[in-house]
Image: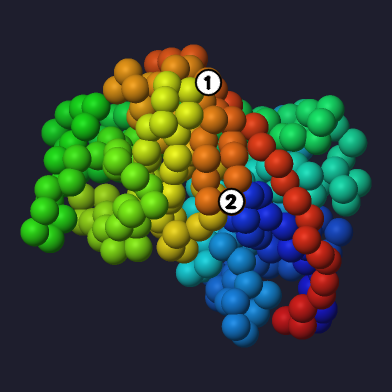
Amino acid sequence: MLLRFTKMHGLGNDFVVIDAITQEVQVTEALARRMADRRFGIGCDQVLVVEPPTDPDVDFNYRIFNADGGEVEQCGNGARCFAKFVRDRRLTGKHRILAQTKAGVLQLTVNRDNQITVAMGIPRFAPQAIPFQAEQPALLYDLQVEHQTVQLAALSLGNPHAVVRVPDVTTAPVATLGALIEAHPRFPQRVNAGFMQVVNRAEIKLRVYERGVGETLACGSGACAAVVAGIQQDLLDSTVTVQLPGGNLHITWPGEGQPVAMTGPATTVYQGRIKI
């Protein structure tokens, strides 16, 4: 069988997008790993699957597989690519799209300038909701990592995030410390580890070691988590530009109990077919 796919990226965070509406396909963990492999497959950070809705109140189901084959709850850069994909493929003509994910319903808005705004949901801080092993919520936690103690914020945006403030993201030990935080036993479902440098109250620099992927050029939910953590610590204002290695995202969070909004681009690279 030849499976049609589209290669896309959001600020360099790259995806293989599969239309499971007009073609019959069941994406498994094994198939996702094969497609994501950069040497023997297509190559991507995540595989995104567009499915018909199972709920009449939404437009699509949206499934996300990391490069290691694990299915996850949320991917902000992927959500923007998802919105562009369903419009480009004429699966919908709507500018406001509702997509069901494992984390809940996402609202996607395609703006006049073709930038896409994603309502990323309300951040959750209770340790059991992240999940994170701690007795009670705190702005910052001490995490013992090998022979050092790392201070970090922990929260969920439908997927788990840890945010470490660093003086300079250029020299931050993302590959080594990020891997240790991602797999730390206090995060029973693993975690996305963000390294944040505060430039001023309206701007940060960020690198993210993504769960099941490694460091990527951009992480949308990680950008949202970093901004939320920074606002909670009174380091940032409510609207922040996040500089990622792949480009900039614009994040807005009014405060506790309110959803986070992320705005940024989505780009189609090419279309192809793979034999499965």
Q: Quadrant of residue 111?
A: top right
The residue wearing badge 1 is 239
Nearest the eye: 111 or 92: 111
Q: What residue type is labelled 2?
A: Gly
Q: Is residue 147 above or below residue 110?
A: below
Nearest the eye: 82 or 1: 82
Residue 155 tag number = none
The picture places residue 76, in percent across and down from the top left corner, at 58, 42
Query: Could you tell me which residue is drawn at 29 percent across and 30 percent down?
Result: 126
Q: In this view, does 58 lie above or below 170?
A: above
Name the secondary structure under disc 1: strand
Please indicate whether residue 134 sits to the left or right of residue 272 in the image: left
Residue 246 tag number = 2
- Of the 4 image quadrants, the one containing the N terminus is bottom right
Q: Label 2 crowding class (10 Å Cα cut-off): few <14, some 14-19, many 20+? A: some
Q: Which amino acid does label 1 sit on?
A: Thr
- Residue 225 appears in the figure: no
Nearest the eye: 217 or 40: 217
Name the secondary structure under disc 2: loop
Q: Is residue 90 above or below residue 261?
A: below
